C-alpha cells in the first residue's frame, strides 16, 4: 500500500502531463462542491484482485476493439500498469469500476491477478459523469458517441452547455455542434458512426431543412465520394434556390473492359476495389482497407511488404 502523500505527489506529477484522469476527477470534485456535494478525495491506492472488480454499469461504451485491447495487454505484460484504475468499494472484497475499463480488461488478457487501483467514494450520478468524461477525453470516440455522451451529461447529470464545455475542455459552440448531430436522420447518424462520412459532411447536411433533400445529398456523398467543400457548395446552392446537380453519367458507365478489370481486382485483393475513369481512359483505382492488418495483407499482395 502507498501512503496518501505519495499518492498526491503522483497525481500532481501526472497532471503536469495534461488533462489526465487525475485532473478530471479533481474537476469533478470542484464542480460537485459548488453544488453543495462534498466528495471524498483519494484515500487509498491498493493492489486489488481483478476478480473482485465488477464493471461500471454506467459505462457509456459497449464495444471495445479487440485488436487495440490485445495491443494494450501486450504493453501491460512488458511494462505493467502505468496509470492505476479507479474504483469505489461496495463491500468487503467487492469493488465497482469508476474508470479504466480498457486497462482492466487488458490486464485480464495479460494474465494479471491484481491491478493497482485508487479507491474512491462516488454516488451513481458521479459514476456516470466520471465515466462519460473519461471516455470523451481518453477514448477514440466517433462523433456520434461523443454527441451522445454530451447529451447524457446535460440531461442526466444536469450540466449546462457552458459548464459541460469547461469540464471537457471545449467551447460551447463545439459542444453544440456535436449535439446537433443527433438531429440528423438515423441513416446519416449510422454512416457518421461508421466513418463513411465525416463530421464536416454531417455539419453541412444539418443546414438542409427538407428531410428528403437532406437524404438525397447524403446518398450523393456516399456514392460520389464528395468532399466536404463540394457538399458545402451544394448546400449553398440549395439555400439560393438552385436545384441540386444530377449525378454525372460517367461516374457509373464504365467500359466493359474496365468493369471486368474492377471485378478481377476486387477478387484479387479480397475487398471492393473502386475504379473510375473518364472518356479518355484517365482515372484512379481505390483499394479500401478495414484495419492495419488488412492494409498489411494488401501490401503483401502488392509485394510491398
Image (spheres, rainbow, N blue to C red):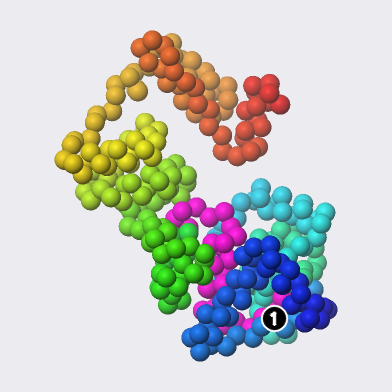
Looking at the image, residue 39 lies above or below residue 167: below
Start and end of the magenta stretch? Answer: 118-145
The N terminus lies in quadrant: bottom right
Q: Residue at x 71, y 58 (%)?
A: 106
Q: Main secondary structure of the magenta part?
A: helix
User: Which residue is at the front of the view, 7 or 90?
Assistant: 7
| 280 within the magenta span | no
Direction from residue 157 to residue 218 in the image, left or right: left
Horizontal relation, residue 168 to residue 189: left or right: right
Q: Where is residue 39, by image quadrant?
A: bottom right
Bin the neighbour count of mark 1 within 10 Å (Cα to Cα): few under 14, some 14-19, many 20 and up: some
Mark 1 lies on a secondary structure that is: loop
Look at the image and tell me in which quarter the C terminus lies.
Answer: top right
> Looking at the picture, how far across and down is residue 9, in whole percent?
76, 75
- On screen, residue 287 above or below 199: above
Residue placed at 52% from the left, 18% from the top?
264
Q: Residue furthest left?
A: 241
Residue 13 rendering spot, x and y as whole percentages? 74, 68
Q: Is residue 33 above or below residue 49?
A: below
Q: Is residue 124 in view? A: no
Q: Residue at x 79, y 69 (%)?
A: 114
**Where in the figure is residue 91, as x and y percent of width and height?**
69, 85
What residue would you read off at disc 1? 42
Front one among 186 and 38: 38
> In the rendered image, is residue 27 in sight?
yes
Comparing 262 with 141, the one in front is 141
Residue 261, x across and y down, in percent: 48, 15
239 lies left or right of 5: left
User: With respect to residue 43, does 73 lie above or below?
Assistant: above
Is 189 in front, or is 36?
36
Q: Quadrant of residue 270?
A: top right
Q: Is residue 136 magenta?
A: yes
Amino acid at each position: 500500500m502507498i501512503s496518501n502523500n505519495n499518492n498526491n505527489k503522483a497525481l500532481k506529477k501526472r497532471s503536469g502531463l495534461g488533462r489526465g484522469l487525475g485532473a478530471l476527477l479533481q474537476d469533478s470534485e470542484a464542480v460537485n462542491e459548488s453544488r453543495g456535494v462534498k466528495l471524498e478525495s483519494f484515500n487509498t491506492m491498493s493492489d486489488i484482485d481483478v476478480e473482485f472488480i465488477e464493471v461500471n454499469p454506467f459505462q457509456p461504451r459497449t464495444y471495445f476493439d479487440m485488436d487495440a485491447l490485445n495491443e494494450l495487454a501486450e504493453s501491460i505484460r512488458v511494462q505493467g500498469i502505468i496509470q492505476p484504475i479507479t474504483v469505489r468499494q461496495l463491500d468487503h472484497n467487492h469493488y465497482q469500476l469508476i474508470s479504466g475499463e480498457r486497462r482492466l480488461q487488458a490486464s485480464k488478457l495479460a494474465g494479471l491477478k491484481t491491478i493497482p487501483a485508487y479507491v474512491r467514494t462516488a454516488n451513481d450520478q458521479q459514476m456516470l459523469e466520471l465515466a462519460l468524461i473519461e471516455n470523451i477525453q481518453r477514448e477514440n470516440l466517433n462523433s456520434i458517441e461523443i454527441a451522445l455522451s454530451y447529451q447524457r451529461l446535460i440531461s442526466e447529470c444536469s450540466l449546462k452547455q457552458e459548464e459541460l464545455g469547461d469540464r471537457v475542455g471545449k467551447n460551447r459552440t463545439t459542444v453544440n455542434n456535436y449535439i446537433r448531430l443527433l438531429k440528423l436522420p438515423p441513416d446519416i447518424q449510422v454512416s457518421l458512426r461508421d466513418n463513411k462520412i465525416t463530421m464536416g459532411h454531417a455539419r453541412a447536411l444539418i443546414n438542409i431543412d427538407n428531410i428528403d433533400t437532406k437524404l438525397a445529398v447524403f446518398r450523393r456523398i456516399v456514392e460520389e465520394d464528395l468532399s466536404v467543400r463540394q457538399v458545402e457548395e451544394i448546400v449553398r446552392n440549395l439555400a439560393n434556390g438552385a436545384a441540386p446537380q444530377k449525378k454525372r453519367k460517367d461516374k457509373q458507365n464504365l467500359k466493359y473492359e474496365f468493369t471486368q478489370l474492377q471485378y478481377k481486382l476486387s477478387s484479387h485483393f479480397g475487398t471492393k476495389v473502386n475504379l473510375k475513369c473518364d472518356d479518355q481512359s484517365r482515372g484512379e483505382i481505390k483499394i479500401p482497407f478495414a484495419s492495419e492488418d488488412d492494409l498489411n495483407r494488401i501490401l503483401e499482395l502488392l509485394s510491398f511488404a
